[in-house]
Amino acid sequence: MILESPLITSACASSPFNHPKADVILRSSDGIDFRVFKLFLILASPFFEAMFELPQPAVGTSDDTKDGLPVIRMQEDSKTLDIFLRFFYPSTLSEDPSFESLTDVMAVLTAARKYSLDLLERKVRKALVNPKFLLAEPLSCFAIARHARFEHETMIAARYTLREPLIPARFLGIDLITASDLLALLTYHQKCTIAVEPLLANLGWVQSHYVNSHGCGWLFCEKLAKGHQRNRRDTDGCKRSTEVEFELWNTPPVAWWVTYMKKTFKILKDRPTGDNVRAEAEETIQNVINTGCKDCAARVKLNMTKFSDLLTLKVMEATALIKLELEF
């Protein structure tokens, strides 16, 4: 929007917004002048098209001129203007910029809505589902997408918030959403947690996948099965579990696998996502390599990687059935 404040000392923006043949100047809120072409603004935005159709003051009759060009003072700062103006320009003059932070995304989204910039809004939507932001700040992505009523992006961000604790710390954008929005997200998170619990309570999915104990001999440690447990050096770290609920085909698996399952599902109670499954698997692999028998140490990486992929899939299938209860 045009500001009514007095002129302030200004500086020139960098290329391509310093072209000598530009026909209008956009001045940012922090005093940076962007020399741009009306044509690019008109083609990109109905807002600017309508504005430039209005009668313009004759050159030299307005205080808001510089070097003979009209000056339009904007509410946006220079960083925001630089980002969204680059999207207007042909690729021969300027490459599309990348968003450095979600703060940039929020500022540009506000400008896109204000100036009816549909193309720029689509760029913002893509940014909100970029793994760069989703992995680092899923809650903020959710808040921004929900505030903008981007249904697809809100749903994707909600799934990524499962990587975070059930009760989150304060995050960027929390003020953009309502208490009802946050409650819906927390309820979704809790339902996903409940959805994965049967995977530990009933290990039938493990038996269905491997068919029989021969399909997953690594879970029972062949040396233990052959009675080699008398040689402590051969089977050090490979003990059978004494917990009946973890038995497979009425046979107790190795204790380190049971430890992995218990630790993993403890984490899944707070963060029900496959990333935690794989992270715990990596830790288990290292522990078995360091302390398990030679046979288990030699095979654990391959087998536990495959098993963690299986468990990750089961977690994803369980949580995929849970819907985020929000209206758009």
Image (cartoon, helix red, strand yellow):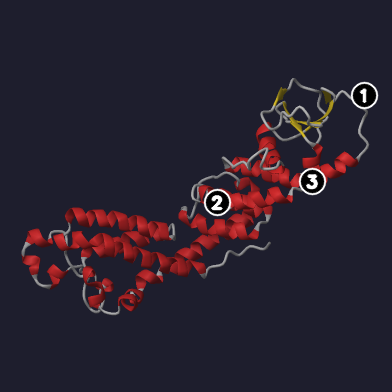
Q: Amino acid at mark 2?
A: Asn
Taking depth in this image into account, of 159 and 243 the one nearest to the observer is 159
Q: Residues within 10 Å of mark 3 (few under 14, many from 20)?
A: few
Whether pointer 1 and pointer 2 mark residues with C-beta atoms closer than 8 Å, the reply is no
> In terms of sequence position, does the residue under pointer 1 or pointer 2 come before the other?
1
Q: Residues within 10 Å of mark 1 (few under 14, many from 20)?
A: few
Residue lying farthest front?
92
Q: Secondary structure at mark 1?
A: loop
Q: Residues within 10 Å of mark 2 (few under 14, many from 20)?
A: few
Q: Which residue does the numbered mark 1 point to in the structure image?
A: 61
Instruction: Note whether residue 177 is visible.
Output: no
Q: Which residue does the numbered mark 2 point to in the structure image?
A: 130
Q: Which residue does the numbered mark 3 point to in the structure image?
A: 43
Give the quarter of the image for residue 50.
top right
Q: How many marks?
A: 3
In the displayed structure image, the side of residue 10 where residue 132 appears, left or right = left
Give the quarter of the image for residue 305.
bottom left
Q: Secondary structure at mark 2?
A: loop
Give the spatial CA distance, label 1 vs label 3.
Answer: 27 Å
Is 228 above or below relative to 4?
below
Is 174 above or below relative to 307?
above
In the displayed structure image, the side of residue 308 where residue 40 appears, left or right = right
Give percent across and percent down for residue 55.
93, 36
Task: Please tell me which residue is depicted at 62% across the width and 50% down the height of the picture.
Answer: 144
> In terms of sequence position, does the residue under pointer 3 or pointer 2 come before the other?
3
Q: Amino acid at mark 1?
A: Thr
Q: Nearer the viewer, mark 3 or mark 2?
A: 3
Instruction: Note whether residue 73 is visible.
Output: yes
Residue lying farthest top?
9
